[in-house]
Amino acid sequence: MHHLKIWLLIVLCVSVTFVQSEKLPKKLQSNFQVWEQNESYLNKIEGGEVNVLSYNTWGLPIALFGHDQAKRFSKMSDSIINIHADIIGLQETFHPDLRDKLLSHLTKDYYTFNDYRCGRTIIPGVEMDCTGGLMTFSVFPIIDEQFFPFPTNEKYSLIEKTGRKGFLVSYLRHGQKTITVVNTHLYAGHDEQAENIRMQQVQYILKVMNSQLIKSSDQTIMLGDFNIHHPDVACSDVYDFIIQKMHFLDSKPHIDASDYTFTDANAYCPNTKQGSKLDYVFIKPTVGGKILSQSRVLDSNQPLSDHYGWQVKYIFEPAP
């Protein structure tokens, strides 16, 4: 959330240009085994069970001292696979090396719709992705996907403009039903202006949903790094908007310090007066749905990011 100060100084020293990479996306030949032939997969479909992971990977486009990108990136894919999630929403996968490693390893067990190798050059020798640092993987086939960049204005910091954040909408086939996954990463910052920008962003998500650009489905999950406090930590108008106006349910409406995903217990997290839960899984309510379990994950004493992950296992209305 607050780790980009050095990057800002670097970027400010050069003129930033957005040039579409000449390297076109290359569709990976996935080694994914056909899950429809797997009995455990069929049982999962019949029971309506879904296991979701949201994780900010801290994959900045520039290697900075102390960020240990090579070490972290080399271990991240296996660590994510070991979570055994059905749906994986990743944020801050800006760095092409990280995206390549994730695609090379995770597509052996997961579907993607795009292979996310699209890149854009921000300064000579520094390349970023085309989907705001977002990647979505699923054991359920992804039948369609679309990225919506957030509108920007003069109040946005240069780093946020460079990151071109937005939200990635993926449509998953769960038996005879469809799950819509909205993966997003909202504006970073502590002050009132940052919160106002985050409010504009969630209002934009709702506007797109209401415009029917997002297709209706049997289940909607919105996950990601929202950069907002949980109400058990501090007030957030954005959090209230998501619950009251967008009509999502927080998977865990009450938390304690063990649920914080951004905390100085993490060696990569800068000293902060107050830890918080910045990463969420929001679910549209369905008949008969219930949370089975949830927890902070990827939180070992050798973290792979400045954020911890958040995993939720739940059941929505079973497939007919």
Image (cartoon, helix red, strand yellow):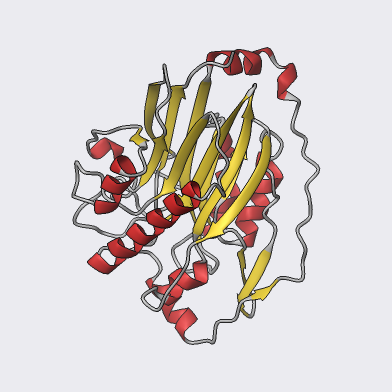
Residue under the image location 27 percent in, 33 percent down: 253
Residue under the image location 38 percent in, 42 percent down: 280
Residue under the image location 59 percent in, 55 percent down: 147
Q: In the displayed structure, does residue 47 sit left or right of residue 195?
A: right
Q: Position of residue 131 (x, y in %)?
A: 59, 58
Q: In the displayed structure, does residue 72 sit left or right of residue 120?
A: left
Residue 108's image quarter? top right
Farthest residue, direction right: 29
Q: In the image, is residue 114 above or below residue 83?
A: below
Residue 192's image quarter? bottom left
The image quadrant where one finds the C terminus is top right
Q: Position of residue 64 (x, y in %)?
A: 48, 69
Residue closer to the observer: 145 or 212: 212
Residue under the image location 39 percent in, 61 percent down: 187
Q: Position of residue 10 (x, y in %)?
A: 47, 80
Residue closer to the observer: 302 or 285: 285
Residue closer to the observer: 59 or 206: 206
